[in-house]
Image (spheres, grey):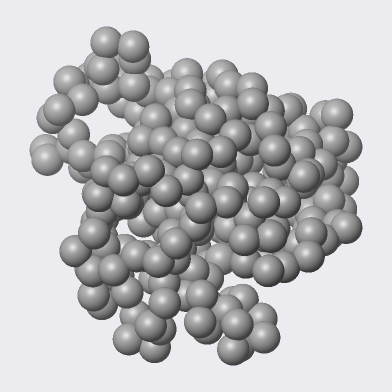
């Protein structure tokens, strides 16, 4: 199932299923468990896609691709390297990434994102599929200069608009071998595959759920392949993941 959050000009904001023929079927309340439908539907062109979920927290992992760690001159960590992005950093497709005045070097990072489907803690890696709602595309936008000078990553990763998500959540997907490509103004910058992740989706969920409870809608960012780079106002970033779709955001000054 392809799950989205949509805005309709007459009917407001709702969750919805997007069918193969691009019909948008409105979901009552929330998409967790077995969704109930309102009976209303529209063509995809009549609605606006929003961030597919509003998480209580975004749990992200750095240096989960060896080649990306090397391109920034970093060691590959023995254990997952976790950080948090605030929920206020989340935006949807088509919304501008706003470059803050505090930074002179902001980078894009295309990533596979995991959306949690039920409350969970102490999940074993082999049981991770049972707590996952689905997968979406993410851009872990980073103020690279502040990441280096601050000593910790909260500010560098946490500015408003620094976590684009979308275009929707794909629930029926094997995350273990998906092509991931990022383009700036149509020029290919990243060309990776999730098979190269150091720690698998299941291992990441086991690691983080041993420390904190994950709630429905929480998002895990699984790391980025090599090829990340700087973005500037006026550019457009597009990230495509096989089996999900393409997340596109313009870049503008704040």
Q: Position of residue 81 (x, y in %)?
A: 76, 62
Quadrant in the rendering for residue 216? top right
Look at the picture and state if 212 lies above or below 150: above
Quarter placement of the C terminus:
bottom left
The front one of 131 and 126 is 126
Relative to residue 88, is residue 129 drawn left or right? right
Q: Position of residue 21 (x, y in %)?
A: 27, 10
| Number of numbered tags placed on the structure image | 0
Q: Position of residue 116 (x, y in %)?
A: 63, 40
The residue positioned 27% from the left and 22% from the top of the image is 24
Look at the picture and state if 85 lies above or below 10: below
The residue positioned 69% from the left and 32% from the top of the image is 195
Is residue 40 among the parts visible in the rendering?
no
Q: Position of residue 41 (x, y in %)?
A: 23, 19
The front one of 168 and 130 is 168
Is residue 187 among the parts visible in the rendering?
yes
The residue positioned 26% from the left and 63% from the top of the image is 251
């Amino acid at each position: 199932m392809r799950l989205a959050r949509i805005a309709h000009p007459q009917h407001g904001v709702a969750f919805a299923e997007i069918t193969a023929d691009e019909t948008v079927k409105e979901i009552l309340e929330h998409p967790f468990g077995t969704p109930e439908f309102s009976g209303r539907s529209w063509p995809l062109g009549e609605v606006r896609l929003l961030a597919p979920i509003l998480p209580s927290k975004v749990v992200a992992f750095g240096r989960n691709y060896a080649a990306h760690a090397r391109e920034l001159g970093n060691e590959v960590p023995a254990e997952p390297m976790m950080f948090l992005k605030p929920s206020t950093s989340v935006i949807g497709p088509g919304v501008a990434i706003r470059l803050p005045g505090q930074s002179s070097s902001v980078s894009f990072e295309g990533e596979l994102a995991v959306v949690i489907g039920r409350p969970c803690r102490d999940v074993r890696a082999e049981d991770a599929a049972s707590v996952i709602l689905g997968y979406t595309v993410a851009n872990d936008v980073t103020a690279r200069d502040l990441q280096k000078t601050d000593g910790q990553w909260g500010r560098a990763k946490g500015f408003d608009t620094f976590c684009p998500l979308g275009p929707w959540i794909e629930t029926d997907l094997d995350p273990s071998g998906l092509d991931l490509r990022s383009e700036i103004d149509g020029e290919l910058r990243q060309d990776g595959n999730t098979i190269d992740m150091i720690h698998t989706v299941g291992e990441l969920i086991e690691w983080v759920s041993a420390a904190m409870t994950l709630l429905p809608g929480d998002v895990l960012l699984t790391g980025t392949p090599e090829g990340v780079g700087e973005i500037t106002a006026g550019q457009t970033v597009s990230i495509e993941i096989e089996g999900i779709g393409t997340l596109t955001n313009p870049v503008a000054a704040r």
